[in-house]
Image: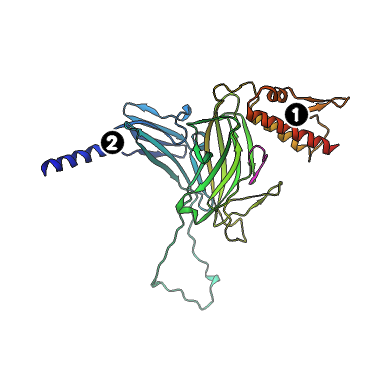
Amino acid sequence: MTVLLLLLCFTFLQTATAKGSEAVIECTPELMKVTIPMDGDRQVAYLDQIKDYKPCRPEFNGKVATFILDLQDPHKCGVTRVLNKISGSRTFYHNILIEGLNGNREAISVRCVLSGKHHNLTKRDSRAFPFDFDEPNVLNITRYEEGKAPEPVLGAIVKQNGKQVSGEISVSPGTPLSMEIFLNNESASVYGLLVNYMHVTDTGKQQETIILNGCSVDPYLFENFVTTDGDTLTAKFRAFKFPDTTYVQFKGTVTVCLNECQGVQCSNGMIGYGRKRRSIENSESNKLYEVALTTFIKVDYANGESREAEDVLNLLKNLKIANQRLGDHDGTPATVAEQTQDNKLVLHPQIYETIRGGSSAAKYSALLTLLCFVITTTILK
């Protein structure tokens, strides 16, 4: 019996040590500092989705890992910011993963809440009541009820064939992907979503707007967000790559509404909106939160794949230019191809080289670009 108790005690102590000590979070309006003791069997700590992204790695000092997260630029390292549009308070949160010696992983949710504007109490104007109204000095309250909706918690992930990809696993340019933006279980039954704005960057100066005022700027590059079950917004796209980096960063602004966000009528006839539940007459009054969120993916060419092909992103830009000629023809020569005086079609060198020797995904995009150009040119004649 004594041996059994000692064994149980030893197991308990070993488990407690393996889990490690709690993280310490310090908040200021400028940054969130997270200090994690790397005791027990803790080996590696990193931000969720961006394990190998150097600008957001922690600083290690002995047995302590320290994350410095910029709250003035929360997109930089994928911090989610939730702005309460009524109170003005802001909540910042992120997830940190810790890997242990035996391959086990801990997930730590870190959070900072910064208060917003304050509401001053004012004395009621007696002129608002009847002349003979006598307000009692003491009120006998026999029943008190208070209800409070949870603050929304959002997530954003990218999937390939139903499986999540992130900044830790590379995908090839042209790979069919989908982005999902969703509410957690606690807030899913209370709120609705609308992706108002999103752009994609190379984590530096290059960026492209893909969602504007709830609608896709170019559905060939990135489709509108749609929903099937009311709890998750999904948009399909093909992986694209910037020339000087393997990382692609998506920065989005999401409106969170009570119950439902009203849909946005897009130019291609589709409705860009999130949860579709009961109708709400005043669509502006139910917009309670504005959420800034970020997600990363890693895009690179596979071994043996041609690097001479133009990036799929640039090809799709050419497609966008050709497609725009339908509604905005000003006689400007096309970037896809040009017709000579003897009616010969001369391809842009990038399009020609890609069709001749590019990867299958790039060839597909180049041919689609050329087809769009031919159709729009024929119509405009």
> Which picture quadrant has residue 209?
top right
Q: In the displayed structure, does residue 137 sit left or right of residue 354?
A: left
Residue occupying image coordinates x 79% and y 36%? 375
Residue 198 lies in the magenta-colored region: no
- Report whether residue 117 is seen: yes
Q: Tell me: residue 111, above or below residue 37.
A: below
Q: Amino acid at mark 2?
A: Ala
- Quadrant location of the N terminus? top left
Q: Which residue is mark 2?
A: 18
Residue 277, image x and y in percent? Answer: 57, 58
Please give the range of residues in magenta: 214-222
Q: Tell me: residue 70, above or below residue 143.
A: above
Of badges 1 and 2, the one in the foreground is 1
Q: Amino acid at mark 1?
A: Val
> Which picture quadrant has residue 302?
top right
The answer to whether mark 1 and mark 2 are in CB contact below 8 A is: no
Q: In the displayed structure, does residue 347 sit left or right of residue 96?
A: right
Tell me the element at label 2.
Answer: helix
- Report whether residue 72 is seen: no
Residue 338, image x and y in percent? Answer: 81, 27
Residue occupying image coordinates x 49% and y 31%? 169
For residue 88, which numbered disc appears in the image? Answer: none
Q: Which residue is mark 1?
A: 336
User: Which residue reaches farthest left?
Assistant: 2
Task: Indicate how the structure is coloured in the image.
Answer: rainbow
Residue 25, image x and y in percent? Answer: 38, 39
